[in-house]
Amino acid sequence: MKRREFLAGLSGSIVLPTLPRAAGAQVTQLDPHVWAITKGATVKKGRVKLELPQLADNGNSVAMKVSVESPMTAEDHVRGIHLFSDRNPVTRMASFYLGPRAGKAEVSSRVRLAGSQRVTAMAELSDGSFWSDTAEIVVTLSACLDES
Amino acid sequence: MSPGSAAARFLVAALACTAAQAQERGIPLDRLKSGSAFLGADLRDLQADDFANPGMLWVERGGKLWREPAGKSARSCASCHQDAETSMRGVAARYPKIDPASGKLLNLESRINLCRAERMGAEALRHESEELLALTAYLARQSRGAPIGVDIGGVARAHFESGRAFYYRRHGQLNLSCAHCHEANWGRRLFAETVTQGHPNAWPAYRMEWQTLGSLERRLRACLSGIRAEMLPYGSPEYRDLELFLAWRAQGLPVEAPGVRR
Amino acid sequence: MAARIQMPKQARHGELIEIRILIQHPMETGYRHDDVGHLIKRNVINAFSCRYNGEEVFRADLSSGISANPYLQFYTVAEASGEIEFAWIDDEGKQGLERQSIAVKA
């Protein structure tokens, strides 16, 4: 049996538990948080652009912008964009749901990052395909203790 | 020259200054740099973004409080001061200053509370309360871009000297003075951070470490905590005097409040 | 819950409009401790939606991974004149609601 078929078979037969993430373990297609959305469909690299600064002044608030190339018509649009962290205690950071009325598949926000890591953005398109991009970021800790 | 001996020379020079020579500056006016110069582009842009700067949430609230009657007099700040954008323009850049009536050194927060007590018959707002932060942020915002310029003559002199002495004195378990970092070693790294010159021009500021807006006094308490010194209680005269010294030290720097800082 | 909204008051039909919103909320992660060591309970805005004349044009599921005083910027297309409504709810069940009118010219 091919690996893909085996994995596809698995998704139908078991309930995926919320597994604790091993520190620094990369978010992949097999991650339960990703699988819950894709149901095992392949996630391709491309079409998505995730922008984060290379170095964050403070992990409490970092500018994030994610955009997807898409005409955003009724026939061809982005259904949703999902953000995953490979280091935060909560892996699935946010999900943004768009649709043809969004006009442009671009969302900006400010995110919390619990240390240097790789963030993954995954888009689901109206044709059922999944695309992703990642961004590496270095997050430094404050030099001084602050008990104010 | 090692940083240590540079610091020692600074301290010796500073402490050797008499009142008459007190105009000697640890950092000359033409070398002053705001804390913004030490931020990454993300936070620098956020501070400049009049909409997304989180401090603006407090500025907006402050604008509402400005017009709200309070206390026995049922007057609001606006009852006497009308439109803050006109009447309060540039005011924050001149604080801390001596209140001529009482002879006390006031910062923005204590000025607000003095007005509330004497003119409005209203309760003082607590330190770091949402209302006081909002009003301080709102007032400071009206001075955005104005160069800091405080008066250290007359009654203010003693406060200035006291603040200056505090600045150059060692404190806490780490036995450091403010000057050790912010005069002898600004621009150098402390772990992953670049040490700033430690100016007050962007306060009150939204500090990312706090995930909220905070006052300059809170930031000074944080510094004391950082060098493992006792954090003096809010409202201590030491903070007020130090704020005056810091404002003198930052003369000419434009007010950036509400600032965004790490 | 205090919120700031930035969006055009008017637009031409079919024009892309940029919407920015900043909401005052601590987005308490549930991982912090207070001065005496007790865990501070998690309370974040977990859902946000934007409706244009009643129809949802943008929705977000948020977590503690979104910063305190959450900021969102997204787009929609100017259709008819009317109201754009923003609604959100946090873990404690507290709801926020803001509305802005938009005039759309043909």
Image (cartoon, coloured by chain):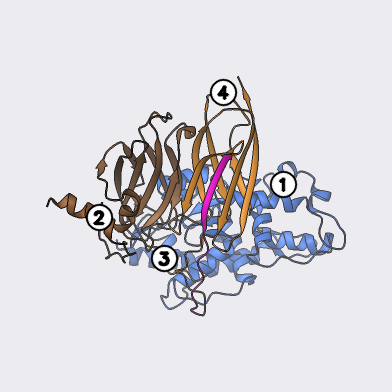
Mark 2 on the same chain as mark 4: no
Residue type at mark 1 is Met
Q: Colour in which chain A is shown?
A: brown
Q: Position of residue C66 (x, y in %)?
A: 46, 54
Place residue B98 in its image quadrant. bottom right
- Residue at numbered disc 1: B88
Asked if disc 1 and disc 3 are in contact, CB closer than 8 Å, the reply is: no
Chain of the residue under label 4: C
Q: Nearer the viewer, residue C60 or B247?
A: C60
- Residue at numbered disc 4: C13
**Is B169 placed above or below C25 here?**
below
- Which one is earlier in the sequence, the residue at label 1 or at label 3? 1
Residue type at mark 3 is His
Asked if disc 1 and disc 4 are in contact, CB closer than 8 Å, the reply is: no
Q: Nearer the viewer, mark 1 or mark 3?
A: 1
Residue type at mark 2 is Leu
Q: Which residues are magenta?
A: C35-51
Q: Residues within 10 Å of mark 1 (few under 14, many from 20)?
A: some
Work out which residue is located at the far top of the displayed protein and give it: C106
- Residue at numbered disc 2: A30
Q: Residues within 10 Å of mark 2 (few under 14, many from 20)?
A: some
Q: Secondary structure at mark 3?
A: helix
On residue B180, the disc is: 3
For the point 30% across and 43% down, the residue is: A132
Q: Nearer the viewer, mark 2 or mark 4?
A: 2
